[in-house]
Image (spheres, rainbow, N blue to C red):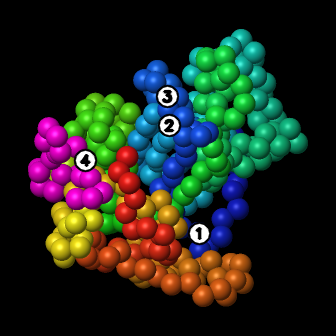
């Protein structure tokens, strides 16, 4: 079978994003069964779309994802069929028959085959289509399972562009995996089964590859050690009664000129990870701004903002947009 082609611009590079989406009105709708279904669907749809999951966290009323969108490449018909089947792990008789029809059409390489390839490729290698498909599929399951109808999600979704390697990606991922700690649900993210770190510790090979990527390690043992140090500042994990740092405590540290370890700050809800638009080195942020201007012709003046060192040592990380508040309520 021939390869289905995706148009590629020479300047296209892989991109990483931190994504967050909440339920309507922030309602705490997701029990453990719902979280498990959403977890499985995230992995299924990411495989179909060719999106790499670095890590994730699914809470009672929202989810976080850190993902990498790879550079677009040729996709063979065999790979398209494999991805298509991933979406239907337990196919009905109709779906099985549909697979057979699609396979036969691809073998003829006619107009119907071209149209099918076009429809599949349009959903792949794109952040918006990936998140949209995850939310649509989960909404259908959730509404049917809970005898409800109507909107499940409060918004489209929010996303920040993240530098796809190094400190920015590792910091955004640690912030994501520490969500259940900030929420007071566990003292250690390995004990919360609906986050990428716990998934990796439990043996999920794809989850392990995500963490190995962000710490630059070729073995899970080395990656696990390095990432756990990133999460807990060399092993200083949250003990009983220390799952969260209060906003008042954090503000007092800032007022007195003290600094907290980065891992301690990440156990607070920091708006730079949701409102900063772009997260990375100052050079990376400037490069993205310039690329946007060239693409759109928009010459509006924008500024690169270094993360404030009075809070913690961010090692040169910067954002595009300064949030209304640097630190929000814990939760």
The answer to whether mark 2 and mark 3 are in CB contact below 8 A is: yes
Residue 12 shows which numbered tag?
Answer: 1
Task: Judge from the rendering whether residue 113 lies leftward or rightward of residue 68; answer left or right.
Answer: right
Residue 179 found in image quarter: top left
Q: Which residue is mark 3?
A: 30
Name the disc covering residue 244, or none.
4
Residue 245, image x, y percentages: 24, 52
Give the extent of the magenta segment.
231-249
Looking at the image, tell me whether mark 1 or mark 3 is earlier in sequence order.
1
User: Residue 162: image x %, image y %?
Assistant: 45, 64
Query: Marks 2/1: CA distance?
Result: 34 Å
Q: Residues within 10 Å of mark 3 (few under 14, many from 20)?
A: some
Q: Are marks 1 and 3 in contact (CB under 8 Å)?
A: no
Q: Is residue 99 visible?
A: no
Residue drawn 70% across and 17% down?
96
SS for tag 4?
A: loop
User: Badge 2 is on which residue?
Assistant: 61
| CA gap, disc 1 and disc 3 | 37 Å
> Are the residues flagged by discs 4 and 3 in contact, CB closer than 8 Å?
no
278 is higher (above) or lower (below) than 23: below
């Amino acid at each position: 079978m021939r390869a289905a082609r995706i148009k590629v611009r020479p300047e296209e590079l892989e991109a990483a994003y931190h994504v967050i989406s909440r339920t309507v009105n922030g309602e705490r709708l997701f029990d453990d069964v719902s979280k498990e279904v959403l977890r499985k669907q995230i992995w299924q749809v990411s495989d179909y779309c060719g999106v790499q999951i670095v890590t994730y966290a699914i809470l009672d009323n929202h989810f976080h994802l850190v993902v990498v969108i790879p550079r677009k490449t040729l996709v063979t018909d065999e790979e398209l069929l494999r991805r298509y089947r991933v979406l239907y792990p337990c196919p009905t008789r109709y779906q099985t028959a549909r697979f057979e029809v699609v396979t036969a059409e691809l073998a003829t390489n006619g107009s119907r085959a071209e149209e099918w390839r076009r429809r599949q490729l349009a959903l792949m290698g794109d952040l918006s289509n990936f998140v949209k498909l995850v939310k649509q599929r989960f909404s259908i399951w959730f509404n049917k399972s809970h005898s409800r109808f109507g909107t499940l999600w409060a918004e489209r979704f929010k996303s920040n562009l993240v530098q796809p390697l190094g400190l920015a990606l590792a910091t955004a991922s640690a912030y994501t995996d520490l969500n259940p700690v900030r929420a007071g649900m566990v003292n250690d993210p390995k004990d919360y089964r609906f986050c990428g770190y716990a998934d990796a510790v439990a043996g999920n090979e794809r989850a392990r590859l995500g963490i190995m990527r962000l710490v630059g390690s070729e073995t899970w043992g080395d990656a696990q050690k390095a990432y756990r140090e990133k999460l807990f500042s060399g092993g200083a994990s949250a003990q009983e009664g220390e799952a969260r740092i209060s906003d008042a405590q954090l503000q007092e540290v800032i007022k007195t000129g003290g600094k907290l370890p980065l891992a301690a700050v990440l156990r607070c809800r920091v708006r730079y990870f949701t409102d900063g638009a772009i997260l990375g080195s100052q050079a990376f942020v400037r490069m993205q701004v310039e690329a946007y201007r060239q693409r759109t012709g928009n010459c509006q003046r924008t500024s690169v903002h270094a993360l404030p060192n009075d809070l913690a040592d961010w090692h040169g990380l910067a954002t595009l947009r300064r949030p209304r508040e640097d630190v929000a309520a814990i939760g």
